[in-house]
Each structure stands twice: as structure tokens, then as C-alpha cells.
Image: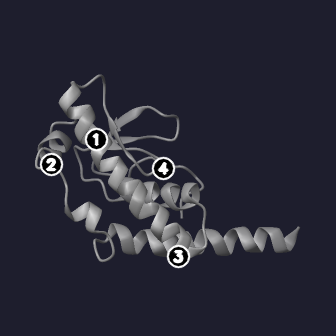
């Protein structure tokens, strides 16, 4: 049992390190090539970071907003898949860790998904994050 826990920790640590690199912009061209409407949608609270590592539409959103979010998420998934393989982690482990980091990096006023699945607006304090987050 101890070796299983140790392996899980090692995989999570690798996923965390790789996610940190990807989210810092060093290893992720997908994040650098955002849709021009992304920043304005984020500032308006129309989109937010989800716990699973992907961008989400807050509320219904129109077709153009959903398409932009889908396009960004396709790029994120491609990067996550590549980085997860390199880190010997699963796609889900890597994406979750990336989500933890993205939520931690939200700025006051931006939207993010809380552990209960609700959309929250970041205040001046730290965001609510899943206890499994590194």
C-alpha cells in the first residue's frame, strides 16, 4: 500500500511540476495564442477557470463565446496530453493540477470554479481550492 501511495505522490509531483511550466508560458504555445476576445470575456466575468483545468462559460453565454471557450480548451487539452505523457501522468492528473494552478493565479474580480462546482468571484484573499490541490 505504501508503494502505491508513494507512486501516486510521485506522479502528482511530476504533474505539478509540468503544469507549472506549462502555465508559466514557458512550454505552452497554446496559451500564448489566445483568442483576442478572451481577456475581455475574462474581465467581464463571462468565463472562468474550472477545477478540471479547462476554461468554462459562466452562465449561458452566446454561441460565439462558447466557440471561443471550446477552441481554447481544445488547445489546452493538446498541451496537457503532451505534457502529461512527458511527466508520466494521466491527462486527468495533469489537467487537474493545471486547474489548481490556474485558479490560484486568478486575479481579484475574475471568476473561478469552487470545489463545490459553483462559480465564485475572486476577492482579495486566496480562492477556494480543492484540498487535493498542490
| 74 on left or right of 62 | right
Q: Identify the secondary structure beneath mark 2.
A: helix
Mark 1 → mark 4, Cα distance in angstroms = 22 Å
Give the numbered dot on residue 69.
Answer: 1
Residue ranking furthest to the right: 1
Residue at which label 3 appears: 86
Please identify the quarter of the rendering in which residue 98 is found.
Answer: bottom left
Which of the marked residues, 4 or 2, is nearer the chain's N terminus?
Answer: 2
Residue at which label 2 appears: 39
Q: Is residue 57 visible?
A: yes
Foreground tag (1 vs 2): 1
Foreground tag (3 vs 4): 3
Which of the marked residues, 2 or 3, is nearer the chain's N terminus?
Answer: 2
Give the numbered dot on residue 129.
Answer: 4
Which of the marked residues, 1 or 3, is nearer the chain's N terminus?
Answer: 1
Q: Do the residues labelled 2 and 3 touch (CB within 8 Å)?
A: no
Q: How crowded is mark 3: few (under 14 residues within 10 Å), some or many (20 or more)?
A: few
Mark 1 → mark 2, Cα distance in angstroms = 12 Å
Residue 38 in the image: above or below residue 5: above
Q: How crowded is mark 4: few (under 14 residues within 10 Å), some or many (20 or more)?
A: some
Mark 4 → mark 2, Cα distance in angstroms = 23 Å
Which of the marked residues, 1 or 2, is nearer the chain's N terminus?
Answer: 2
Residue 7 in the image: above or below residue 57: below
Instruction: Please state the horizontal and vertical placement of residue 58, each as a whole percent of the image.
Output: 31, 31
Instruction: Please state the horizontal and vertical placement of residue 19, each as a whole percent of the image.
Output: 44, 68
Residue 5 in the image: above or below residue 120: below
Amino acid at each position: 500500500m505504501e508503494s502505491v501511495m508513494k507512486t501516486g505522490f510521485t506522479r502528482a509531483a511530476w504533474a505539478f511540476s509540468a503544469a507549472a511550466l506549462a502555465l508559466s508560458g514557458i512550454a505552452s504555445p497554446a496559451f500564448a495564442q489566445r483568442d483576442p476576445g478572451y481577456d475581455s470575456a475574462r474581465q467581464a466575468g463571462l468565463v472562468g477557470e474550472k477545477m478540471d483545468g479547462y476554461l468554462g462559460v459562466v452562465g449561458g453565454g452566446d454561441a460565439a463565446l462558447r466557440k471561443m471557450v471550446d477552441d481554447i480548451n481544445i488547445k489546452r487539452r493538446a498541451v496537457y496530453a503532451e505534457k502529461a505523457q512527458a511527466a508520466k501522468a494521466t491527462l486527468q492528473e495533469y489537467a487537474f493540477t493545471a486547474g489548481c494552478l490556474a485558479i490560484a493565479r486568478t486575479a481579484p474580480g475574475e471568476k473561478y470554479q469552487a470545489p463545490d462546482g459553483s462559480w465564485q468571484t475572486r476577492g482579495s484573499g486566496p480562492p477556494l481550492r480543492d484540498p487535493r490541490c498542490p
